[in-house]
Each structure stands twice: as C-alpha cells, then as structure tokens.
Amino acid sequence: MSSPMDEDAPALATVAAKAVGLLNDATGPEVGYPGLSDAGDVEDVLAALNRMAGDLQQTATQLTLYLDDEVAAGHLTTAPGASGQDAEAVAVARNALTDVRENAQTLARLLTTAETAMLALRPAN
C-alpha cells in the first residue's frame, strides 16, 4: 500500500532538501560536529551521499523524459509574457537537466574518491 507521499514528487524533493539541511546541522563545526563521533561516521555519510548522487542522476533523467513526454503531448507552452519559443524553453530545460545529471555523476565520482581516501585513515592512538 502506498502513502500519498509516495507519489508526491515535490513533497519528496522538499523532504530530501530538508534532510540535507539537517545533515549540515549535524556536521557543523560551530556546534561541535554533533552527528559525527569518528572517521567511520564520515565514511558512512560519504557512502550515503554517493548513493544520493547516483539517485540524482536517475531523477534528472526521469525529469527530462517527463518533460519530453509533456511537450510531445502538447501540454507545455511558454508562460504568458515569457520571451522565446516553446522549443527554446524546452531546450534550455533539457540542457540544464543534462548538466544536473553530469554534475551528479561527477559528484558521485568525487564522493567515491573521498570515501576511498577515508578508508586509509585511522584515528591516532
């Protein structure tokens, strides 16, 4: 059985954004890094963020597919007063989503690099 949240993409995106904000709070030096107790926690955070970066790649792809489907169905036109043609606006959105996907892929690679480097670090005794 699905909950209303399961199908409410904007609400889920809002939850994800709030979760990242909470993560920022939990890793803040100004409050003593309350969510981190050792290097293993850093590794765990990096691994979870890496999974998130992979999921963001898929989300960007799916948003592009949705946009393409909506355009093909004739459901999207430029807003009143907006400059440019529908095709130009769609191209801008598609290009931006492609950039999001590529940057999320780069983010995933960098997080993997950081996580691998963390595995080589151990607390000093």
Image (tube, rainbow, N blue to C red):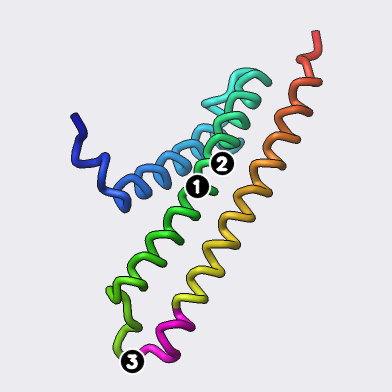
In the rendering, at what x and y percent does residue 62 appear? Answer: 44, 53
Q: Are the residues tagged 2 and 3 within 8 Å (C-beta)?
A: no
Q: Are the residues tagged 2 and 1 within 8 Å (C-beta)?
A: yes
In the rendering, at what x and y percent does residue 54 appear? Answer: 56, 41
Q: Residues within 10 Å of mark 3 (few under 14, many from 20)?
A: few
Question: Measuring 46% from the left and 61% from the top, which residue is drawn there?
Answer: 64
Q: Is residue 73 magenta?
A: no
| Residue 22 placement: quadrant | top left
- Say whether disc 1 or disc 3 marks the residue closer to the N-terminus: 1
Give the SS element for disc 2.
helix
Give the SS element for disc 3.
loop
**Residue type at numbered disc 2:** Gly
Left or right: residue 53 versus residue 89 is: right
Provide the residue span drawn in magenta.
Answer: 81-89
The front one of 72 and 104 is: 72
Q: Which mark is residue 81?
A: 3
**Residue type at numbered disc 3:** Gly
| Residue 102 placement: quadrant | bottom right
Q: State the quadrant of the N terminus.
A: top left
- Say whether disc 2 or disc 3 marks the residue closer to the N-terminus: 2
Q: Is residue 87 magenta?
A: yes
Question: Measuring 40% from the left and 44% from the top, which residue is drawn there?
Answer: 18
| Residue 40 placement: quadrant | top right
In the rendering, at what x and y percent does residue 55 appear? Answer: 50, 42
**Residue type at numbered disc 1:** Gln
- In three-dimensional space, the C-alpha distance between marks 1 and 3, rounded to whole angstroms, equals 33 Å
The residue wearing badge 1 is 58
Q: Which mark is residue 54?
A: 2
Q: State the quadrant of the C terminus.
A: top right
